[in-house]
Image: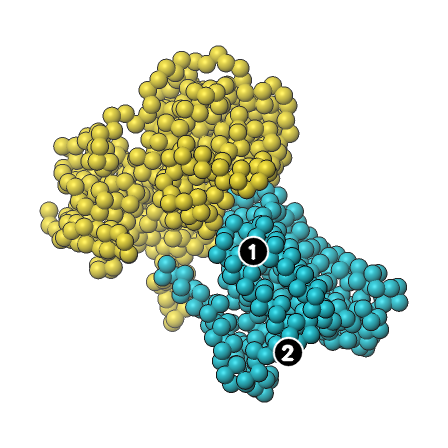
């Protein structure tokens, strides 16, 4: 295989940080070369440097770069619209977009407005956009972060076909399972250095984690007794847009399902944050409660760590302290009280911040997520709703969040966990329900909740 | 921005020789008091990611109503002006928060509507201020003794509330110099005291109350604020109503100082207020800005006005320079932020 690109001893310094320290990396045509490492290891910086030097590289970035109001075709051809006499040639654009989508076997109409698509489908459009330039070198930065396993499967199919046609693919991801499955070679980055490059067949997950973290992480999920709980039901939701569920004291209830199955909508509705909710009754510790706004839900003892922390969770340009006490401000008698509570939260969750008055947006993703979690713990909830609590954060921070989830459960909190990462749901939950097309498709006790069972229910092959 | 202010002052002092004279400083601060009160009110609205363009027209309306209701007595007249401000502000706030109409549009409508209402009510005529106390609100000087008393009270409050020793000392020195300078020309002007009381209260609200904190949260990330249990709509409505009340206060200061209420009073004042906030570091994207900054911005604007008048700079040139300063101030601020 011929070399598509080679970087030799690349260094990059930002004020105060050596982001890349003599990193070498090469990419051959017809291979998938994965780049793994914790957040801040230098993966994205490496991509930035490479793209700045070699403009022919097509990149699919982690953050979507689509114009939401434009159609799929308009997005695919954004900035290089086919023209006739200086006027956009719509027919050529639609035809071109259709050709690319067909080639990738993506079943979408090019006229569709992008913001009507689910986040997973938007990612597929993003990939189509990158490939429509007939790129021979493709870089994907965390492409599956927002995808369900099924959607990721579609993506892998596309990548395998591209590889077979000779495209050189650099693949950046946190998810070691998929990296091991799809990559030919794997390079590990840590603290701005390339630690190793090996054939994927010679590697396994524990080895990779050890290299990424720099220490052995024997077990990602806390091991403990997880027999069925017989404690009392703390929270019950009846017929929330057709779904009913309950959680017991000290129990983690996992909710699995494909992206778009209605899991986030369900949590939003249970938190009083979905104005379109048409039905639903709620009971906390057996008592009926009315939940028509987030304030109602908080008053009833419910807390909600939302997905997409940048959009729904963190006040990025405010201080850590302000973020921490946002939902519990009225509980404090005075400022000293507030500061003391914030400091306890920072210590308890081991949030890495230089001070309570650091701007939250300057923290790493994992620490921002801990700030959001701590914000909700300060409301002393009985019920904790978690929506994708570890999306886009590094392995070390993930593990800390997992430990916190199990600790809170063991202290008696009732927890509802939504996650697109199946191992996470299976590794943390005492009980799993599966949502398919807005309905509960199946429920499994811990022992029966295998990846196969859950996936079968999530894709509609089993009905409750 | 403090450096910019000092530079402007030195420049004008060198060119005119009388800029820093107590009499001129008192004039400058009197001119500033109306913009200062409006800027402080505007801060609440901008911090919550909204804007109010109707402020100037509302100054005209509230001032006109106050002048028209003088027959019912001073208290009634003042109350009417402030009530009109609150009602108009709350109405606009409700349209923004509950009807989801962008504040730019609602208050652009307000800018036209309130001006139309006062033109209609006054039939285009200017109404003189007849009540002596109303007049005094805009021009009176406190006796030197009461100036000292208020200064001492302010320093005592600083020592009591503030945690930051350095800023307490700096502010105390500023207060002493301010009172001494004003007393040297007869006493502290009443409108300046009104402005400072408004600013002090607003500073407390933004920094030490739940309401103030929530406005910053809403401006910073409305979705996150809502999901943290904050009633965004209610707080946005309150911010507009609060600005309305302060517009009422500013209209009284303005009408009292001018000595009459003309139907075109207050024209373009909304832009001065917004400019003062922005020069003082307030972000139009919401979530960022301080009362002290807005006041500083108003002081810079007033200094430019005053200094250029002393130098007999033509009106046309004054506009151009003020416009350039506004854009340059924000440009420097953005450049400074990016390099961080």
- From what the image shows, is residue A329 above or below residue A168? above
Q: Residues within 10 Å of mark 1 (few under 14, many from 20)?
A: many
Indicate the colour of chain B. cyan
The residue located at (50%, 14%) in the rendering is A231
**Looking at the picture, how far across and down is residue B267, in whole percent?**
68, 73
Identity of the residue furthest to the right in this view: B71
Numbered label attached to residue A134? none
Residue A42 makes an appearance in the image: yes
Q: Is residue B173 left or right of residue B134?
A: left
- From what the image shows, is residue A398 above or below residue A164? above
Label 2 in the same subunit as label 1: yes
Numbered label attached to residue B47? 1
**Looking at the picture, how far across and down is residue A74, in whole percent?**
41, 57
Assign a secondary structure to mark 1: helix
Evaluate if marks 2 and 1 touch, with contact meaning CB atoms under 8 Å apart.
no
Q: Using the image as rendered, state which of residue A125 and residue A170 is in the foreground.
A: A170
Q: Which chain is yellow?
A: A
The alpha-carbon separation of the residues under discs 2 and 1 comes to: 35 Å
Q: Quadrant of residue A91?
A: bottom left
Q: On the image, numbered disc 2 is attached to which residue?
A: B23
């Amino acid at each position: 295989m011929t070399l598509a690109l080679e970087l030799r001893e690349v260094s990059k310094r930002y004020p105060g940080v050596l982001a890349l320290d003599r990193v070498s990396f090469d990419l051959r045509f017809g291979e998938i070369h994965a780049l793994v490492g914790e957040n801040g290891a230098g993966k994205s910086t490496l991509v930035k440097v490479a793209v700045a030097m070699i403009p022919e590289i097509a990149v699919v970035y982690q953050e979507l770069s689509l114009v939401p109001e434009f159609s799929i075709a308009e997005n695919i051809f954004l900035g290089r619209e086919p023209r006739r006499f200086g006027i956009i040639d719509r027919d050529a654009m639609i035809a071109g977009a259709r050709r690319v989508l067909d080639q990738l076997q993506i079943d979408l109409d090019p006229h569709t407005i992008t913001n009507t698509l689910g986040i997973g489908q938007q990612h597929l459009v993003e990939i189509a956009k990158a490939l429509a330039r007939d790129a021979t070198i493709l870089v994907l930065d965390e492409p599956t972060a927002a995808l369900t396993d099924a959607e990721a499967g579609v993506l892998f199919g596309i990548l395998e076909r591209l590889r077979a046609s000779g495209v050189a693919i650099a693949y950046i991801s946190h998810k070691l399972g998929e990296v091991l499955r799809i990559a030919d070679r794997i390079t590990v980055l840590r603290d701005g250095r390339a630690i190793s490059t090996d054939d994927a067949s010679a590697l396994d997950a524990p080895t990779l984690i050890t290299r990424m973290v720099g220490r052995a992480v024997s077990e990602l999920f806390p091991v403990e007794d997880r027999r069925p709980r017989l404690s009392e039901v703390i929270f019950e939701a009846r017929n929330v847009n057709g779904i009913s569920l309950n959680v017991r004291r000290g129990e983690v209830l996992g909710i699995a399902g494909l992206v778009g199955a209605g899991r986030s909508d369900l949590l939003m509705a249970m938190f009083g944050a979905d104005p379109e909710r048409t039905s639903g009754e709620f009971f906390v510790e057996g008592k009926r409660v009315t939940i028509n706004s987030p304030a109602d839900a908080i008053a009833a003892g419910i807390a909600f760590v939302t997905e997409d922390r940048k959009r729904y969770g963190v006040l990025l340009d405010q201080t850590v302290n302000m973020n921490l006490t946002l939902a519990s401000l009225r509980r404090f008698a005075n400022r000293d009280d507030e500061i003391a509570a914030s400091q306890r939260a920072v210590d308890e969750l081991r949030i890495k911040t230089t001070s309570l008055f650091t701007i939250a947006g300057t923290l790493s993703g994992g620490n921002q997520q801990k700030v959001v979690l701590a914000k909700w713990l300060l409301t002393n909830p009985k019920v904790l709703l978690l929506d994708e609590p570890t999306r886009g954060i590094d392995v070390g921070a993930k593990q800390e969040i997992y430990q916190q989830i199990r600790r809170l459960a063991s202290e008696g909190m009732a927890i509802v966990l939504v996650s697109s990462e199946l191992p996470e749901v299976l590794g943390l939950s005492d009980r799993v329900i599966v949502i398919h097309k807005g309905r509960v498709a199946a429920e499994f006790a811990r022992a029966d909740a295998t990846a196969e069972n859950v996936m079968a229910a999530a894709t509609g092959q089993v009905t409750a | 921005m403090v450096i910019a202010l000092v530079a402007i002052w030195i420049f004008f002092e060198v060119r005119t020789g009388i800029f820093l004279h107590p009499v001129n400083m008192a004039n400058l601060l009197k001119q500033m008091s109306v913009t200062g009160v409006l800027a402080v009110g505007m801060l609440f609205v901008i911090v919550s990611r909204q804007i109010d363009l109707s402020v100037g027209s509302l100054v005209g309306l509230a001032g006109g109503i106050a002048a028209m209701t003088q027959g019912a007595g001073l208290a009634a007249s003042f109350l009417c002006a402030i009530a009109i401000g609150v009602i108009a502000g709350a109405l606009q706030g409700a349209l923004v928060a509950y009807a989801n109409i962008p504040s730019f549009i609602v208050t652009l409508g307000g800018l036209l509507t309130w001006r139309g209402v006062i033109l209609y009510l006054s039939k285009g005529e200017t109404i003189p201020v007849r009540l002596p106390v109303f007049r005094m609100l805009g021009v009176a000087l406190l006796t030197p003794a009461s100036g000292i008393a208020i200064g001492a009270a302010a320093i005592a409050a600083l020592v009591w509330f503030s945690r930051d020793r350095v800023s307490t000392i700096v502010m105390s020195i500023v207060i002493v110099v301010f009172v001494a300078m004003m007393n040297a020309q007869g006493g502290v002007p009443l409108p300046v005291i009104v402005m400072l009381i408004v600013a002090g209260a607003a500073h407390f609200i933004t920094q030490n109350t739940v309401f103030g904190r929530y406005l910053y949260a809403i401006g910073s990330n409305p979705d996150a604020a809502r999901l943290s249990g904050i009633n965004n709509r209610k707080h946005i409505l309150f911010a507009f109503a609060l600005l309305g009340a302060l517009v009422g206060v500013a209209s009284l200061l303005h009408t009292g100082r001018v000595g009459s209420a003309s139907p075109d009073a207050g024209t373009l004042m909304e832009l001065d207020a917004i400019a003062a906030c922005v020069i003082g570091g307030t972000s139009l994207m919401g979530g960022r800005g301080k009362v002290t900054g807005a006041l500083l911005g108003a002081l810079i604007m007033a200094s430019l006005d005053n200094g250029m008048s002393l130098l007999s700079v033509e009106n046309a040139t004054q506009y151009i320079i003020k416009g350039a300063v506004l854009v340059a101030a924000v440009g420097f601020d953005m450049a400074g932020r990016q390099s961080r």
